Amino acid sequence: MLAASAGVTATAAAIRSGEVSAAEVTRAALARIESIDSKINSFTAVTAARALAEAHKVDAARVAGHALGPLAGVPYAVKNLFDVDGLSTLAGSKINAERAPAVHDAILIQRLHKAGAVLVGALNMDEYAYGFTTENTHYGATRNPHALDRIAGGSSGGSAAAVAAGLVPFTLGSDTNGSIRVPSSLCGVFGLKPTFGRLPRTGTYPFVASLDHLGPFARSAQDLAACYDAMQGYDAGDASCAARSPEPCTAMLDRGNTGLRIAVAKGYFESRIATEALEAVQIAARCLGADRAIELPEAARARAAAYLITASEGANLHLTNLQRRAQDFEPLSRDRFLAGALIPATWYLQAQRFRRWYANEVAKLFKDVDAIIAPATPVSATPIGAETVTIAGETMPVRPNLGIFTQPISFIGLPVAAVPIYRAGRMPIGVQIIAAPWREDICLRIAAALEAAGIAKAPTAAL
Amino acid sequence: MKPAVIDEAFIVSSANGVGLQLAPGHIAGVAKNFETIAGMAALVNDFTLDEAAETAAIFTPCWPPAQE
């Protein structure tokens, strides 16, 4: 039997060779969820019958000698804003629990099904993805598998925690302002936020349409690349999806960082940051020989503009329910949603105009560098329920500030790999590897290089 | 707009303008959040952009659906 820590590639290989059946792997994943998830609260639904049916089909195909997909028999789960046939798409809310069950899977689930992956359930998140902690009042907080009294990060907290706990080899989440990268950092797993428009969002519940991205979590760069490659491709159902052909990355990982010009983000990314987060950046930079520094122009304004766009579009999406039943919203984000509804159009439009200016200015930086290293979070995981955190002598609210280093990047849709920098005996923390648009291959190559050097690691939590 | 003018009366009347009847228990929280937003807006609005600077989101005309 495969170890719980077996990743995507190892699991698929074992099933392909007949060493283990997809049904055995699926039953083992379901048993782990049954015995462990009550400690971390990462799942909101388990699709056991569907999973076993999908696994039996994989096994039947193997016995019949049919070609198997690259992810054949690999169990996974999705943030509960993905449509799953037969489940109501909660998006972390009480309100959406009243919706009829979805009648189709989201397009990315359809693609993973084609690749042979086996869906075992849906995962916890901040309500409507508006948060960085996954302290969900309706469905309970997701706990960090590495320290159960601490947050998992958010809004895709269930997605990161399920991978960190070894419940499944990979998961899917969404990232509007940092919701893949923040929980990846705090739970110590790899995460990929692709370029805006790369992966179609068809069949997912939106938060901020002009900023929303989807992407995978896994315990290695190679696993991340394998999942990502299986999901690429245009879909007309998402108006923001780019009409680009898939650009597979998996085969490029062994090129490492050879020939890549890598810089460290300075200025904005060095203030309001704990020593441990700065150390993580320094460790990665040393390993990669990144001795040049670079400053993203007006990063603080970029973060502010992302904040405005998020608040305004998010409130607009939910205005009818805010008018009719505000009391049913998550108490931790309700007042933020209500305040967002009051933003004048001119503020929103100025933020969108600034966004184009900023995107053009940052694009110029990539003439001289191929990738930028930046912290993913200002601190490691904070205690569940903490309202404030003190960083470098400054006390600030936890919930809006965990994304201060991720917001200026997703704001202009750049691809980013969140990479866990391993420090034995200490809480996980990650760095962002940022590249020019459509260069996910560079992010993943550098993530793989850090892993090969033993700097990046995502050990399964002992639970 | 300076945060000083964001008092509860302003919040209630602005909310009414977009069809929101704020419960009394929410008003202070909404005001606090709106002050944060106004601070962010001040930072963005203080930045001088060229008059020709377009928004990031640009409208694209849609093709008609293909005929059956």
Image (spheres, rainbow, N blue to C red):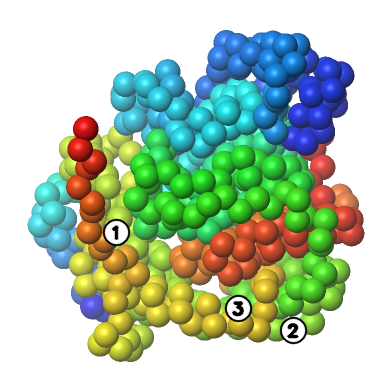
Query: Looking at the figure, which quarter contains the C terminus of chain A?
Result: top right
Q: Which residue appears at 45% of the width and 27% of the height?
A: A105
The residues tagged by marks 1 and 2 sit, at their Cα atoms, a distance apart of 37 Å
Marking on residue A366 = 3
Q: Is residue A369 left or right of residue A88?
A: right
Which sits earlier in the primary sequence, circle 1 or circle 2?
Answer: 2
Residue A286 in the image: x percent, y percent? 84, 73
Kindly check if marks 3 and 2 are in contact, taking CB atoms under 8 A apart as contact: no
Image coordinates for residue A359, horizontal then vertical, percent: 46, 75
Residue behind mark 1: A312
Q: Secondary structure at mark 2?
A: strand
**In the picture shown, does residue B40 fall above or below A158?**
below
Chain at numbered mark 3: A
Mark 3–mark 1 distance (CA, rounded to whole Å): 30 Å
What residue is drawn where x is 62% and y is 45%? A228
On the same chain, marks 3 and 1? The answer is yes
The answer to whether residue A120 is above or below residue A196 is above
Q: Position of residue A122 (x, y in %)?
A: 53, 28
User: Disc 3 marks which amino acid?
Assistant: Phe
Q: Does the image show residue A316?
A: yes
What subunit carries mark 2?
Answer: A
For label 2, the residue is A292
Q: Nearer the viewer, mark 3 or mark 1?
A: 3
Which image quarter is the N terminus of chain A in? top right
In this view, which residue lies farthest toward the front? B68
Rendering quarter of residue A78: top right
Mark 1 or 2: the one toward you: 2
User: Disc 1 on helix, strand or loop?
Assistant: helix
B51 and B59: which is toward the camera: B59
Three-letter code for the amino acid on which mark 2 is drawn: Arg
